[in-house]
Image (cartoon, rainbow, N blue to C red):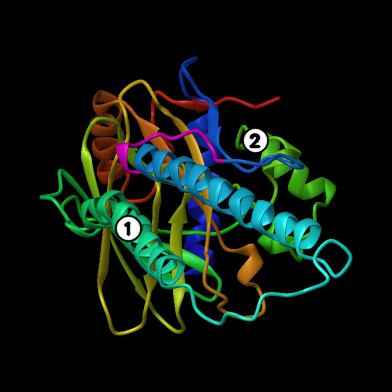
Amino acid sequence: MRLRTLATSLAAAIAGGAAAAQELQVIGQPVQGKMGWQPAATELARDIHWLDGMLLVIITVISLFVVALLAICILRYNQRANPEPASFTHNTPIEVAWTVIPIVILVFIGAFSLPVLFKQQEIPEPEVFVKATGYQWYWGYEYPDHDISFDSYMIGSDYGNQLTPEVSAQLSEAGYTDQQFLLATDTAVVVPTGKIVVVQATGADVIHAWTIPAFGVKQDAVPGRLAEMWFEIDEGMEGIYFGQCSELCGLSHAYMPITVKAVTQAEFDAWIAETQTAGRYVEPGSVRVAASE
């Protein structure tokens, strides 16, 4: 498998060098020192972002309310301000309130969060089907409907997972910068925008997890089981998206990234035809990765 992947990497570099001028921008990637979400490229991701914002408001209000109660108790009922403490032990209205109000809040949250969960778990009929198999420590991909399969290794895995001059050269040749080290892979999942993509995940050895934050998807890949997730990338959001194995899977867990290239339907069809003709993975024929700032 390793030799095959090295060969496909060379083929990808050759094909990429002959590609047309159209470029893919890196859209979904982590940024050093930044907080918050990556740009949402799917409806699922936008739902999660909205839900997170709503919960943040609710949690903030509750936290401020609790802090205010603590401040009142500290200032009004300390020994100096209230030398004679009250002797009652029960207050029925308050006890009813602190039981009912949390229930109402949880029901309110559930009314919005459960539909988001159901939307993720109800898998629609796929327009593009991809099988992702996790290995220690790389991903194998199959397009069963198109008889295409290839492996995907992190660029730099041949050099001890270190950013050496040779690795920098490989990244540059593939159109990436050193910023994409630990993120970029020698091959990538290619999918069209505006189409329902279903990814079936499994593991070949231990539990892995296939995750793309910008898509709002994450699914454990368990040996002996088949699990599915789906997404539909918005049209106009063509670009490069990075993810990681998100389940601790051994020594090189941190060096098992995921790269997805979202292209137009026409470019996807051309990639399928070119890859089938070549009998191996090639870069999307009319797409060239744009080096990000």
Residue 35 in percent (x, y) is at 67, 41
Mark 1 or 2: in front is 1
Decide which of 128, 42 is in the foreground and name it.
42
Residue 229: x, y in percent? 28, 58
Quadrant location, the C terminus: top right
* Residue 32 covered by magenta stretch: no
Q: Residue at x 36, y 51 (%)?
A: 280
Residue 104 tag number: 1
293 left or right of 65 in image? right
In depth, the one of 70 and 102 nearer the eye is: 70
Q: Secondary structure at mark 1?
A: helix
Residue in view at x 62 percent, y 32 percent: 175
Determine whether, in the image, residue 1 is placed left or right of residue 184.
left
| Element class at badge 2 | loop
- Seen in the picture, residue 16 relative to 260 is either above or below; the reply is above
Amino acid carrying mark 2 in the image: Tyr
- Label 1, label 2: how far apart the Cα atoms are: 50 Å
Q: Main secondary structure of the magenta part?
A: loop
Residue 25: image location, x then y, percent: 53, 26
Q: Is residue 173 above or below residue 4?
A: above
Whether residue 70 is visible here, answered yes or no, is yes
Q: Nearer the viewer, residue 254 or 103?
A: 103
> Mark 1 packing: few (<14 Cα in 10 Å), some, or many (20+)?
few
The label shown at residue 176 is 2
Q: Is residue 38 magenta?
A: yes
Compare residues 89 and 238 and report the one nearer the observer. 89
Residue lying farthest to the right in this orientation: 80
Classify residue 130 by image quadrant: bottom left
Q: Position of residue 30 (x, y in %)?
A: 63, 43
Q: Which residues are magenta?
A: 37-44
Image quarter of residue 141 = bottom left
